[in-house]
């Protein structure tokens, strides 16, 4: 009996376990499957205006292709020019000097060639000389000498008249005067040229032309842009330097001119240059007087090197105004020579005589045009022959 009870319990337990397992399987089969995983949405593409490049449309997307990159333009330095030498320049430019002979040289020749030279004619000769800026004192000397020579000769041929006038002009100009630019180096130190003058006379241009002329003669040149009052002056000088390969030392606008001049000389020594040319201001924006500043520039340079030439630039067309300027500059700096600009085509050629007489220094350079090679060493004989004509 007990065995039957145990069997019944075992069978009941098996039935219960089987029923529970079937119930669990039924519940799992009725569970809702999880939702499918959706791929992440791409962010919206912003539409951009197709200002540059090509727009390519594919379905609903828009792609902007950038424009092709421009090639980088490398600035090309201007080619360095090879200027002609200074020798013979005035002979080549003689025709430009001859433009003034109609009112000066030819006028005098015509007056002296008249059959009768009375006081009225001599007054005209004197007036012609003064109008040409020869100056009152030199004019009186020339007229007296010509009157004496004409009386001795008696009758005069055109060649004799021309010879008389040529002789007197050469005497007053000083045919035998030393007009050499002293530009010899001092050992390892370069020669130094200080260029002075009032703005508007062609001072900076003359500085650039002189550098060009010296480079043409085979010299190495450094330029000092000590005219710090005018920014355009430094730029102008830099252009001249680039053309011929001359280095330019400059400072800030409104800076100390003496400092720039000192740095230019120092650079000339370091670079083993032959000549340093320093362009100075013709006026200043400070309360310091121009002449005081020029004196300071010269003293500062002399701490480093010797100032071999002080060239005063004068405009040949300014006449007696130029003479007054020259006298003021001569009181401050020891002027060694004159550069006379705008001499071509002017009836004011007599200023060569008057300025030399007043200052006691020779005209060493003349500007005979606007071209880069129109600055020439002054040759008295070429000058007088051009004025008188052939």
Image (tube, grey):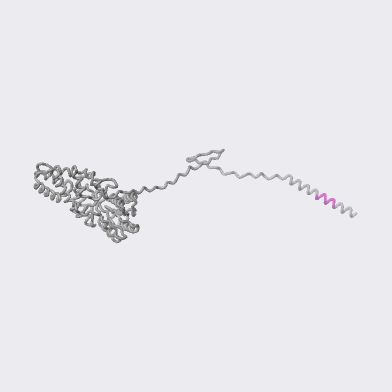
Q: Residue furthest right?
A: 1
Which of the two residues, 80 or 321, is positioned nearer the viewer here? 80
Residue 179 seen in render: yes
- Residue 261, quarter of picture: bottom left
- Magenta span contains residue 370: no
Where is residue 73? Give x, y as percent.
42, 46
Q: How many marks?
A: 0
Q: Is residue 186 above or below residue 152?
A: below
Which of the two residues, 107 or 153, is positioned nearer the viewer here? 153
Q: In this rendering, would 109 be left or right of 257? A: left
The stretch of residues the image draws in magenta is 10-17
Which of the two residues, 54 or 382, is positioned nearer the viewer here? 382
Which quarter of the image is occupied by the C terminus? top left
- Residue 255, quarter of picture: bottom left
Where is residue 342? Give x, y as percent.
24, 47
Where is residue 318? Give x, y as percent.
21, 48
Q: In this rendering, would 115 be left or right of 358? A: left
Magenta stretch: helix, strand or loop mostly: helix
Where is residue 230? Give x, y as percent.
30, 51
Which quarter of the image is occupied by the N terminus? bottom right
Q: In this rendering, would 172 be left or right of 23? A: left
Residue 204 seen in render: no
């Amino acid at each position: 009996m007990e065995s039957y009870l145990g069997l019944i319990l075992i069978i009941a337990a098996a039935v219960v376990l089987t029923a529970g397992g079937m119930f669990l399987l039924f519940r799992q089969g009725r569970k809702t499957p999880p939702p499918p995983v959706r791929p992440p949405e791409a962010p919206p593409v912003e539409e951009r205006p197709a200002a540059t490049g090509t727009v390519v449309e594919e379905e609903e997307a828009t792609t902007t292709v950038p424009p092709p990159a421009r090639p980088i333009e490398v600035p090309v330095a201007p080619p360095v020019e090879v200027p002609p030498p200074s020798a013979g320049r005035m002979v080549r430019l003689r025709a430009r000097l001859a433009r003034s002979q109609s009112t000066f040289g030819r006028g005098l020749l015509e007056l002296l060639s008249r059959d009768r030279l009375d006081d009225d004619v001599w007054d005209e000769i004197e007036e012609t000389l003064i109008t040409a800026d020869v100056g009152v004192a030199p004019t009186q000397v020339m007229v007296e000498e010509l009157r004496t020579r004409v009386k001795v000769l008696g009758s005069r041929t055109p060649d004799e008249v021309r010879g008389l006038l040529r002789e007197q002009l050469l005497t007053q100009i000083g045919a035998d005067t030393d007009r050499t630019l002293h530009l010899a180096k001092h050992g390892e130190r370069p020669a130094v040229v200080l260029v002075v003058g009032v703005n508007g006379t062609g001072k900076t241009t003359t500085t650039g032309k002189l550098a060009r002329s010296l480079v043409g003669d085979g010299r190495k040149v450094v330029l000092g842009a000590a005219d710090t009052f005018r920014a355009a002056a430094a730029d102008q000088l830099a252009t001249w330097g680039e053309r011929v390969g001359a280095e330019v030392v400059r400072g800030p606008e409104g800076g100390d001119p003496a400092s720039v001049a000192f740095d230019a000389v120092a650079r000339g020594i370091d670079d083993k240059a032959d000549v340093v040319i320093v362009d100075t201001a013709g006026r200043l924006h400070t309360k310091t007087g121009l002449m005081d500043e020029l004196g300071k520039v010269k003293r500062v340079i002399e701490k480093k090197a010797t100032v071999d030439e002080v060239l005063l630039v004068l405009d040949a067309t300014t006449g007696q105004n130029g003479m007054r300027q020259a006298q003021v500059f001569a009181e401050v700096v020891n002027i060694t020579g004159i550069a006379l600009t705008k001499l071509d085509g002017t009836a004011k050629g007599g200023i060569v005589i008057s300025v030399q007489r007043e200052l006691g220094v020779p005209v060493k350079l003349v500007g005979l045009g606007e071209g880069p090679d129109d600055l020439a060493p002054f040759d008295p004989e070429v000058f007088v022959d051009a004025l008188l004509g052939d």
